[in-house]
Image (cartoon, helix red, strand yellow):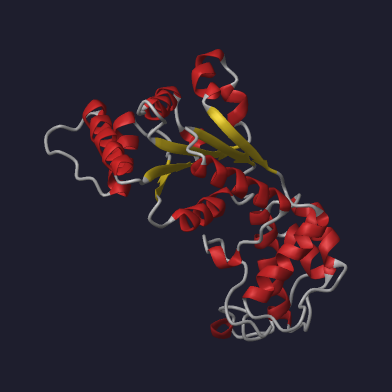
Amino acid sequence: MEAAVAKPLDMALDYCEYFGLQRMPFNDSVNPEFFYRTAGHEAAFVRMMICAKQRKALGLVWGRSGTGKTLLAQMLLTALAGEEFIPIVVLATPGMSKTGLLACILEELGIPRPAGRENAQVYLEQIHSFLMESYSRGRRVVILVDEAHFLPSDLLHMIRALTNLETPQEKLCTVILLAEETFPRRLRHKRYSSLRGRIALSSYLMPMSRAETEQYIKFRLMVAGSGEEPFSEDCYDFVHSHTGGICREVSKLVDNALMEAYLRGEPKVSREIVQHCADHSL
C-alpha cells in the first residue's frame, strides 16, 4: 500500500518533534554518543586497547561494510587521547601512493613536510625521528588505518616498514588496520607472510544478533531522547532478517520507517511500514 503524505512539504524535514526526540537517532555519522557496543564490538575494542597498551606492532579489525569499524576507531582515538599515547586516524583511499600515505601520517602528527623533498624515504625518516622523540618523552604513537582494504601491495609493505621502526627494547609505534572482511584472505598470500606475522591481535566484527539489533535501535532512540517506544514489537524480527544485523543497514531502514510513519500521521511504526520502506529502498 502506498503511503499517503499527511504533512506539508515544508514541515516534513524530520520526525523528531513528532516522536518526542531531541535529535536524529539514526544519522549515518561518526558520533560516539550513539555507539552501541555489542559483545563483538566490546571484544574488538579491548583487543585494540591491549594492542596499544602492550606496545604491539600491528593489530587488525575486520568485518563487513557498515558493522561499525570507523566508529570503533573513533572510540579508540578518544580512549587513547592523553599523556601516554599520540593516536591518529588515517583514511586509506583507492589509488593512494606510498608518498600519499606517509604524507597523511605526517599531517595527522602535525609534522611539517620539507619543501622540495616530497618522497617516501624522506617522509619515513621524518616519521622515524618523530617516533624516537616521542619515545624519549614516554609517549607512543598509535596509527589507526581505516579502510585498509584499499591499500595496494606496495602500501602494505610500507606498513610493514613502519612496524620495523624500533629501539633495542620495543617497536616505536603501533599500527591498527581496520578493513572489510575480504582483507584477511588477501593477507594469506605468501607475499604478505612477513606482515601477517607481525599481527599480534585481530578481531572480526560480526553482524548483530536479533537481540542486539533490537537493543541497538532502542539504545539510539534513548540517546536521542525518546520517552516512548515508537516501534511496535513485531518490527524487530523483520528489521533483523532484512538487514542481516548490519548496523548501517539497520539505521537506514528504521530511519526511513520513522519518516514514513510521520508522513502518514501514524503514532507508531508498524511492521507494515517497515516492510514498505524495505520494499521501496535500494
Q: Is residue 144 left or right of residue 131?
A: right
- Please determine whether, in this image, residue 271 is positioned above or below residue 227: above
| Res 259 seen here | no
In the rendered view, tell whether residue 137 sits above or below residue 168.
below
Question: What is the total number of numbered labels drawn onto the structure image?
Answer: 0
Q: Residue pushed farthest right?
A: 234
Residue 3 visible = yes
| Coordinates of residue 133 in the picture (x, y in percent) | 26, 41
x%, y% of residue 267?
77, 84
In this view, the residue farthest toward the front is 169
Residue 185 spot, x, y in % from top left: 62, 25
Residue at screen point 64% across, 55% down: 248
Residue drawn at (46%, 53%), measured in percent from left and top? 80
- Of residues 40 and 198, the one nearer the viewer is 198
Residue shown at 40%/37% (left/top)? Answer: 173
Q: Determine whether, in the image, residue 121 is placed left or right of residue 228.
A: left
Q: Which x, y percent locates residue 265?
A: 73, 84
User: Does residue 138 appear left or right of residue 274 in this picture?
Assistant: left
Q: Nearer the viewer, residue 178 or 243?
A: 178
Q: Residue furthest left?
A: 116
Query: Front-most of 99 and 114?
Result: 114
Splitting the image into 4 quarters, where does residue 135 fall? top left
